[in-house]
Image: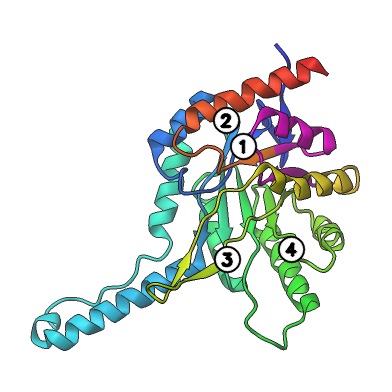
Amino acid sequence: MINLKTKYLGIELKNPIIVGASNLVTKVETLQQMEEAGAAAIVIKSLFEEQIQLENLQMGEEMDEYADRHAEVSSLFPTLEHAGPREHLMMVKQAKNAVKIPVIASLNAIYKETWLEYAKLLEDTGVDGIEMNFYAVPKDFNLTGEEIEKEQIEILKQVKSILSVPVSVKLSPFYASPLNVISRMDKTGVDGFVLFNRLFQPDIDLDNEEHVVHFPLSTPEDGKLSLRFAGLLYGNVKGSICSNTGIYTGADVARMLLAGADCVQVVRRLGDNFYQHVVQIGCCLCCNFNAL
């Protein structure tokens, strides 16, 4: 039997196949089935600060509306507050306790203070590592790309300074010079890089004149960018390299590893038949390496 062991973020994995963050990885039963199918690690669905803010705002509006309609009754009840990240933290802790393979938390925040606070809370759940999902749409016309990069690197430094678990960074390819940014981040001591973040763009439903967001599946062609940068980074950074997006088969995994990646993350390929797909990817990977 071919040895597929690898290391990611300093963590030994039985093979290079990691299940990436998505809505699939929210139920304990699903996580256990993925482990049984052969997944080497799991990244839990991201904790989004922006989502918590929106839920908090929506809750406040609904409470205010109820108070306007039923002022006398609403005054009898205590003030309600949004639970913040507590529900998500509970889910992460349950996930960690449900499986034996490494569990990595994922975080996307807006403000530096929140990055630090939430990262520490996630570490306290017992996870094996934290993936920092660096992406936000700049809304300030005066904010330069250099300023954004400096802020992200400073956040990364501070997060690394307060955590004992390894930290990876999931990046978009839309930097002016991705290699330069990754090189500077690597100097902070970050433990790994995920290439690349797949971003969902807004659309408009013309029939209903409503804002909608589609979640199109990636294609094998989408993996070419990760393949290129895995090769460019190999031997030039200390952090682990994890390829992401467009990985559908064991052959796709083999290409990423040959280019220089330490491991891969699969998400969209899993779909409803995730158990079967994880098994197929693992078997196909073994066949490809046996043929080399």
Front position in the image: 290 or 260: 290
Q: Which residue matches tag 1?
A: 18
Counting residues from the start of the chain, the first of labels 4 and 2 encountered is 2
In the rendered image, which quarter contains the N terminus?
Answer: top right
Q: Is residue 229 left or right of residue 123?
A: right
Residue at the top extreme, as displayed: 1
Which residue is denoted by mark 3 in the rendering?
Answer: 201
Q: Secondary structure at mark 2?
A: loop
Residue 157 numbered mark, or none: 4
Q: Amino acid at mark 2?
A: Ala
Numbered disc in front, either 3 or 4: 3
**Residue at which label 2 appears:** 39
Task: Nearest to the eye among marks 4 and 2: give it.
Answer: 2
SS class, disc 1: strand
- C-alpha span from label 3 to label 1: 25 Å
Give the residue drawn at x 77%, y 37%: 256
